[in-house]
Amino acid sequence: MDLTGRSGEMAVFAQVVEAGSLSAAARALRLTPSAVSRSIARTEQRLGTRLLLRTTRAITLTAEGAAYLRAARRILADLAEVEEAIADQGVPQGRLRVSAALGHGRMTLVPLVAAFSARYPDIVVDLALGDEVVDILAGQADVAIRFGQLADSPLSARPIGVTGQVVVASPAYLARHGTPQVPEDLLEHNCLRFNFRRALPDWPFVRDGQAFALKISGNIECNSGEALALLAREGAGIARIGEFSVADDLRSGALVPLLEAWNPGDLEPIHAVFVGGATMPARVRVFVDFLVERLGS
């Protein structure tokens, strides 16, 4: 190991803390104990403070040492990620961070991960499922699956599908409150809504070829389509959500489609969003290609 640079000294320091002794760290790093000791001494001299308290039995971190360890681990992880990304330009490998909505990720992406990993065993898929919108440009993910029309941004995007919308309720809810016969009947019902900033309180319908919107209201809002589907199944109210979220429930009869004659048939596009360009890592490129291959049709 090169001990002349600060990153090398950080790596030695972190290894000493992890191993619990200079001699154990030296064995792990294939260095002599004296070389490890000199590296620690150079770091402490440069910083002008003690990082470790050493006795014959144990090594203890000082407060400054604990702060330096946290920073060192973060810097070493960032350095490894940068080198991994650069080395990844030709061969798909390394960690691939994918962000997707909970429901769509569980039902659509998770079944594909096994096949993708079998094709690219050197790629570690780090899949985060949740309904918060991650900042790809800030490095929070490599690829994100986004629903709806995309805002202008420097990001690249490829379409991987569309989903329709359906108004649903449980048989139990309808037995208690009645079945809406026309869209305006929804004004007398508890409607479950999304709470995204971009979510509007209006549900679109069509009558005699003319589109119109109905402002609905209810006492539950949520940021997850899967959660809204569960709430609808539990009889909490009527929801309008993506068909993919409730496909199984509609087949089983746990949820009933409503007002289909007034459904405008609007389709919500689904995109894989990422940082494109000539320097795009191979692991990102092959994953997006794989999604288009499996889902794009």
Image (cartoon, helix red, strand yellow):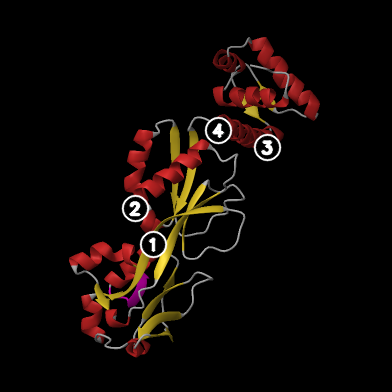
- Segment tinted magenta in the rendering: 235-241
Q: Which residue is mark 2?
A: 108
Tell me which residue sits at (20%, 65%) in the image: 251
Check contact, mark 3 vs mark 1: CB within 8 A.
Answer: no
Of badges 3 and 1, the one in the foreground is 1
Q: Nearer the viewer, mark 2 or mark 3?
A: 2
Q: Magenta span has 49?
A: no
Image x and y of residue 239, in percent: 35, 75
SS under mark 3: helix
Q: Which residue is painted at 35% across and 68% down in the image?
A: 164
- The C terminus - image quarter: bottom left
Q: Which residue is mark 3?
A: 67
- CA–CA distance between discs 2 and 1? 12 Å
Which tag, 2 or 4, sits closer to the chain's start?
A: 4
Q: CA distance from mark 4 to mark 3?
A: 34 Å
* Within-10-Å neighbours for mark 2: few <14, some 14–19, many 20+: some
